Image (spheres, helix red, strand yellow):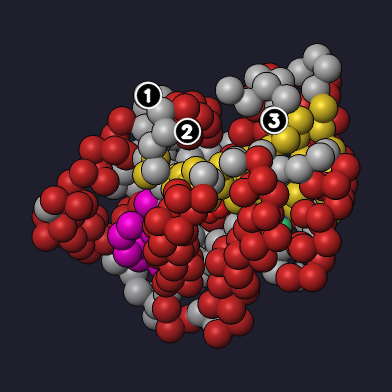
Amino acid sequence: MFRNQHVVITGGSSGLGLALAFALAREGARISLIARDPRKLEAAANAIRTEVRDARVGVKPVDVADEAAAQAAIGELAWSEQGVDVLINSAGILREGYFEDLAMTDFRQVMDINLFGLLHVTRAALPHLKRSQGRLVNIASMAGLSGVFGYTPYCAAKHALVGLTDSLRYELAPQGVKVHLVCPAEFDSPMVDALDRSRTPENRAHTLTIPKTGVEVIVKGTLAGIRAGRFLIVPGTRTRMASFFMRHFPGITRMVGDRAIRQVYAGPEHHSSSPLIECRETGLPLGNSKPDD
Ligand SMILES: NC(=O)c1ccc[n+]([C@@H]2O[C@H](COP(=O)([O-])OP(=O)(O)OC[C@H]3O[C@@H](n4cnc5c(N)ncnc54)[C@H](OP(=O)(O)O)[C@@H]3O)[C@@H](O)[C@H]2O)c1
C-alpha cells in the first residue's frame, strides 16, 4: 500500500513518528522526517538506513509552530520528492501539572505546536494531498476524547484537534483525500519517560486506568486502521474497550477516574516535585508496558 509513496512525518525523529517511519520504510515508502533538532533527525534517519535495506529517508529540521518555515519545508519536500502522498502529523509536546500551577505560556506553547503547528503543515501539504488523492493522518490521543487530571493544556489542544480532524474529514472526502484520526492511550516513548520523572500522582493514577502499551501496538493498530480505511483509529484492544465505555457509559467512566484519583490525591499544595515538563528528551523506555494487541 505504501510502496514508493512519499510519506511526510512530523515528529519523525522520536517515539511514535519514528516507529511509524521504520514500519513504512520497511514497506518501501519514501520517508521525509520533520522535527526541530537536526541531530536527532539525522540520528533517526541513519538508524532507519542501517536497519532497512535500500531505505529512502530525508530530513527537514523545522519548528512546525513557525508557519512560514513549515510552509517552506513542505514546499521543498514536495518539490524534491514530486509531491506528498501521505502526511502523518505526530509532532507534539506535553505539559502536565495542576491547572493552578500552570502558566499561560504552557497553554500557548501546547496550542502553538499541537494544534497550530499541525494546521501549518496540513495547510501547506493540502494542495499536494489533493493532487495525489492522498491521506492525512492526525495523531491525537485518548486525551482528545476525554478529560484527564493534569492535562488541561494537552487535553484542550487534543480535543481541538479531534474537532478539526472530524470537520476536515467531511470537507476532504468529496475531494478524494482520506483522513484518519488516531487516538492512542499512553504508550512507551521519550515523551512518557520525561513525564514519568515528574508527573503528579493523580495524573499517573488517572491515565493508567488504561494500561500503558508499547509503541509497536500503536504502530500496528494505526497501519491496520489506515489499511481498513477507518476514520477513527483507537489502537489496542483494551484502549478500544475503554473508548467504547467512555462513549456509552460516560458516568461510569467518570466514577472510575474519580476513584483512581481519590486514592492518591495530593493536590497542588502537597505535591513537591516540579509539575511542569517539556517532553522532548530522548531516553530509554521504562519497561512497565503491557502487551495489548
Ligand atoms: N506517548 C504517549 O503516551 C502518547 C499517547 C497519546 C498520544 N500521543 C501523541 O503522539 C504523538 C507523538 O508522541 P511521542 O510520545 O512519540 O512523543 P516524542 O517521543 O516526544 O516525539 C515528539 C516528536 O515531535 C517533535 N516535535 C516536538 N515539537 C516540535 C515542533 N515544534 N516542531 C517540529 N517537531 C516537533 C520532536 O522532535 P524535536 O523536539 O526535535 O522537535 C519529536 O520528534 C504526539 O502528538 C503525542 O501527543 C502520545
Circle 3 Cα neighbour tier, 10 Å, few/some/many (<14 / 14–19 / ≥20): many
Q: Which mark is residue 182?
A: none
First-in-chain label (1 vs 3): 3
User: Helix, strand or loop at disc 1?
Assistant: loop
Q: Which residue is mark 3?
A: 5
Distance Cα–Cα, label 3 vs label 2: 14 Å
Q: Considering only vertical position in the picture, is 283 above or below 46?
A: below
Q: Is residue 269 visible?
A: yes
Distance Cα–Cα, label 1 vs label 2: 16 Å
First-in-chain label (1 vs 2): 2
**Residue drawn where x is 73% and y is 25% of the image:** 4
Q: Label 2 amino acid?
A: Ile
Q: Which residue is mark 2?
A: 226
Part of the protein shown in magenta: 142-150
Q: In the image, residue 268 lies at what x, y percent? A: 40, 77
Circles 1 and 3 in contact, beta carbons < 8 Å? no
Q: Main secondary structure of the magenta part?
A: loop
Circles 3 and 2 in contact, beta carbons < 8 Å? no
Distance Cα–Cα, label 1 vs label 3: 27 Å
Left or right of residue 46, residue 254 in this image: left
Q: Quadrant of residue 87?
A: top right
**Residue drawn where x is 58% and y is 79% of the image:** 108
Q: Which residue is mark 1?
A: 293
Q: Label 1 amino acid?
A: Asp
Left or right of residue 117, residue 224 in this image: left
Q: Considering only vertical position in the picture, is 223 above or below 282?
A: above
Q: In the image, residue 262 lies at what x, y percent? A: 22, 63
Circle 2 Cα neighbour tier, 10 Å, few/some/many (<14 / 14–19 / ≥20): many
Confirm if mark 1 falls within 8 A of ligand 1: no
